[in-house]
């Protein structure tokens, strides 16, 4: 097949950036990485990019295609070529470019190091026997363990674009991999440090990391798990944590978001005074409901029952999120006849099945 590519070439020494077009003859099964190999081999040996495994394992070949991060060795070119589309290939975002499609990964690794990506078991002598962990407990960090450190999520992170010091999706997903590991004994210290400035609560929840991750790690979900775990052990001094807490209190007490109290509850009274002029403006234009009598939803009892149920079933913290992920995964697989479809998400050795008020727990 004939494949055309536009590639942003960059010379860091001269600071020059130029878009070059290449046309090659490639086999129908070719991936983007195969096409780059052909360009380098037959047309322009000076083209620079990273690769190693060619099978979505090493994480070396992250780059952007038409503005979104991809793994070059995972991206098939057949349909793109058939459609006559000429994709634009460029280096990943949020990392300094060294040459062409090669970025400096040092800022990425610095953040990975900052979350202490190793097990802290709390003892130095490993003992004689293996330390066997139940499958259900490892299920909690199944997705986070799939990360291949490619940086595609970091490339697309909105928060990192405005705050380069933000720990970012890959490092925080790695942090969750250890926070959720039942063998790790440094959970509270980890949660404390991940909850500081540039940590968990600086994520804007844009979900771009989740959309671009080629391995299904779902880093934004990992960050949500970290937030839930931090709250469950009482680490909630960050404004983001207070904000989230107030959402829960609002829903439980009135069934609505009590927005008028959101700023004082999140930022404190002193800071709210500074926002008074803005608040009065909103009030004047009828944008703020009067605080008295409180606006309570007709079926607020349902919101309260839901709150009690989550507590009663022990679904607070990361385990609640992991259970939802498993249930969604089951729904996805149930559409086919594969053996995976027959395997329930709450099967033997897995999480307890959620139940409604009046029902009996089944596990
Ligand atoms: S969801 Fe959060 S971590 Fe993920 S890309 Fe958006 S801001 Fe970054
Ligand atoms: S979370 Fe996904 S996108 Fe991010 S580094 Fe890991 S594998 Fe790559
Ligand atoms: S070359 Fe290893 S992930 Fe693409």
Image (tube, rainbow, N blue to C red):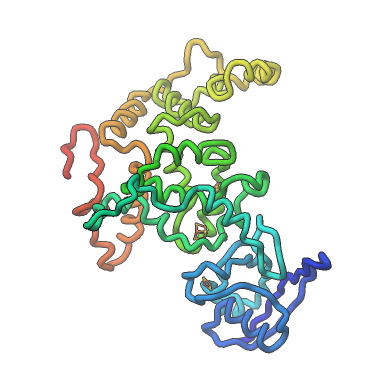
Q: Is residue 177 left or right of residue 81?
A: left
Q: Position of residue 253 (x, y in %)?
A: 40, 21
Q: Would residue 284 be visible to someone looking at this image?
A: no
Q: Would residue 180 be visible to someone looking at this image?
A: yes
Numbered circles on residues, count: 0
43 over 123 or under it: above or below: below
Q: Position of residue 91 (x, y in %)?
A: 67, 65
Quadrant location of the N terminus?
bottom right
Q: Is residue 107 left or right of residue 241?
A: right
338 over 39 or under it: above or below: above
Quadrant location of the C terminus?
top left
Q: Residue at x 21, y 52 (%)?
A: 349
Q: Quadrant of residue 105?
A: bottom right
Q: Position of residue 18 (x, y in %)?
A: 79, 70
Q: Nearer the viewer, residue 1 or 148?
A: 148
Q: Residue at x 39, y 51 (%)?
A: 119
Q: Position of residue 233 (x, y in %)?
A: 38, 32
The single residue placed furthest to the front in the displayed view is: 125
The single residue placed furthest to the top in the displayed view is: 292
238 over 329 or under it: above or below: above
165 over 63 or under it: above or below: above
Q: Nearer the viewer, residue 125 or 136?
A: 125
Q: Nearer the viewer, residue 60 or 359?
A: 60
Q: Residue at x 52, y 54 (%)?
A: 170
Q: Residue at x 55, y 14 (%)?
A: 290
Q: Is residue 156 left or right of residue 251?
A: right
């Amino acid at each position: 097949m004939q494949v055309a590519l536009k590639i942003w070439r960059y010379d860091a020494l001269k600071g020059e950036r130029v878009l070059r077009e290449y046309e090659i003859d490639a086999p129908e099964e070719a991936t983007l990485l195969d096409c780059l190999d052909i360009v380098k081999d037959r047309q322009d040996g000076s083209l620079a990019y990273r690769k190693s495994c060619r099978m979505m394992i090493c994480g070396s070949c992250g780059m952007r295609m038409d503005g979104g991060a991809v793994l070059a060795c995972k991206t098939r070119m057949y349909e793109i070529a058939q459609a006559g589309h000429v994709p634009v290939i460029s280096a990943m975002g949020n990392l300094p470019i060294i040459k062409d499609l090669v970025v400096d990964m040092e800022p990425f690794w610095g953040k990975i190091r900052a979350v202490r990506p190793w097990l802290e078991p709390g003892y130095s002598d490993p003992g004689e026997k293996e330390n066997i962990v139940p499958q259900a407990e490892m299920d909690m960090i199944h997705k986070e363990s799939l990360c291949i450190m490619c940086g595609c999520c970091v490339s697309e992170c909105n928060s990192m674009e405005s705050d380069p010091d933000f720990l970012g999706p890959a490092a925080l997903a790695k942090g969750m991999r250890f926070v959720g590991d039942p063998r790790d004994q440094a959970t509270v210290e980890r949660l404390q440090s991940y909850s500081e400035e540039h940590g968990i609560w600086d994520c804007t929840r844009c979900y771009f990391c989740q959309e671009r991750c080629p391995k299904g790690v779902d880093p934004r979900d990992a960050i949500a798990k970290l937030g839930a775990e931090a709250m469950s052990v009482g680490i909630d001094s960050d404004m983001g944590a207070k904000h989230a807490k107030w959402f829960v209190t609002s829903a439980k007490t009135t069934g609505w978001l009590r927005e008028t109290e959101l700023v004082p509850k999140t930022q404190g009274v002193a800071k709210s005074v500074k926002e008074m002029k803005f608040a009065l403006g909103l009030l004047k234009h009828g944008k703020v409901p009067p605080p008295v009598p409180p606006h309570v939803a007709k079926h607020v009892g349902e919101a309260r029952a839901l709150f009690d149920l989550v507590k009663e079933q022990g679904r607070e913290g990361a385990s609640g999120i992991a259970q939802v992920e498993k249930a969604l995964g089951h729904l996805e697989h149930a559409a086919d006849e594969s053996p995976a479809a027959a395997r329930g998400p709450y099967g033997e050795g897995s999480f307890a099945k959620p139940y409604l008020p009046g029902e009996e727990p089944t596990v």
